[in-house]
Amino acid sequence: MKELLLSEYKPVSQCVTKETHITKAKFKVIDIHEHMGKLVLGDNYQDQYDLIQYEQELKRLNVHHVVNLDGVWGHEFTKMMKHTEDLKHMISTFVWIDVSKIDEPDFSEQVKTHLHEAYAKGARGIKMWKVISLNQKDRAGNYIRTDDDRLQVVYETAAELNIPILIHIADPVAFFLPIDETNERYEELGENPDWAFGKPDQYSFQELMEMQDNMIRKNPKTNFIVAHFGSYAENLAHVAQRLDQFPNMYIDIAARIAELGRVPYSSREFFLKYSNRILYGTDCTPINLRAHHKYFRFLETYDEYFEYQEEGEEPGQGRWRIYGIGLPDEVLKDVYYRNACKLLNLDINQFE
Ligand SMILES: [Zn+2]
């Protein structure tokens, strides 16, 4: 038999299973995790999609409200708010914090003013991401910890304004491990080598989880939506323990159905038990909303052994397939809109 390279191996499953194609969610949906700005689409993001068309596509999917995580700050924030003005009835924009100023003596005052002003101009949440914890260092040369006291002003102001913080720290565990024949995301890291962590002075995955715990514990009045299933979709028991411990912690499912769908029994149990803490999210952008179909299929059906990626694409996250978890209606309603409604202070009647 001819020897094959891993990159040449494309097995075709001969398993014949039921296929349910859901192009519209069973109930109205709020997507807590979308990107409409330059982080994913680049500087000329406004030219890449038409808002009217975007609205129509969302409605076809039964998505009636989205969180735009790309609020940034300063003139970028103003530009974004202007760009999305016509659709503001169905968008909640989350604003960022400029942590490059963390060493300035009046950082705390700056942040407070920035957040109050952004709120007055329509921001409805705060987005924090890997700039904090993995990418940016302070003047002392340390990566900024999420439990750094200098960030307390962010957490306290969020509580004061009654807006949530969506935070994305860490990444799949495999990104922190050696890239060798044992790494389950070997091909993904091969395609995106800069996604790997593990520089000697970078925090380990475990350290990141500890500081995440400290941050949530220290700020019981702040609502945290910890993106990507609490940063640790590979370990549902770990996440469950945190949800038990911290009533102010919520999680989204963005970019994690590949993880959840490979452990369907535990995932289903988890969703039933923590239905009031899980939020629907996709990581989609207005130029590609088709990923929603797979999310609906995963949540609503018992389909077996299906591909989590879109048709014609390689399995981006690892060589496995997923199973649907057939959630009951009440759980779907929690995940699709009830929890998000509560955190975003939206009127639930628009979604019932
Ligand atoms: Zn994202």
Image (spheres, helix red, strand yellow):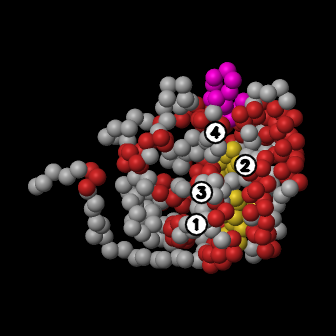
Q: Amino acid at mark 3?
A: Leu
Q: Name the mark on residue 243.
A: none
Q: Amino acid at mark 2?
A: Val
Which of the 4 image quarters holds residue 14? bottom left
Q: Is residue 213 above or below residue 76?
A: above
The residue to which callout 1 is attached is 287
Q: Nearer the viewer, residue 203 or 55?
A: 55
Q: Name the mark on residue 131.
A: 4
Q: Nearer the viewer, mark 4 or mark 1?
A: 1
Q: Residue at x 40, y 76 (%)?
A: 18
Q: Is residue 318 left or right of residue 146?
A: left
The residue to which callout 3 is attached is 41
Question: Marks 2 and 4: in contact by CB < 8 Å?
Answer: no
Q: Residue at x 66, y 56 (%)?
A: 37
Q: Earlier in the sequence, mark 1 or mark 2?
A: 2
Q: Amino acid at mark 1?
A: Ile
Residue extent of the magenta highlight:
137-149
- Most extreme residue toward the left is 1
Q: Residue at x 57, y 41 (%)?
A: 170
Question: Marks 3 and 4: in contact by CB < 8 Å?
Answer: no
Rate crowding at label 1 as few (under 14), some (14 to 19) or many (20 or more) other CA atoms within 10 Å.
some
Mark-to-mark CA distance, 2 and 3: 14 Å
Q: Amino acid at mark 4?
A: Val
Rate crowding at label 4 as few (under 14), some (14 to 19) or many (20 or more) other CA atoms within 10 Å.
some
The residue to which callout 2 is attached is 72
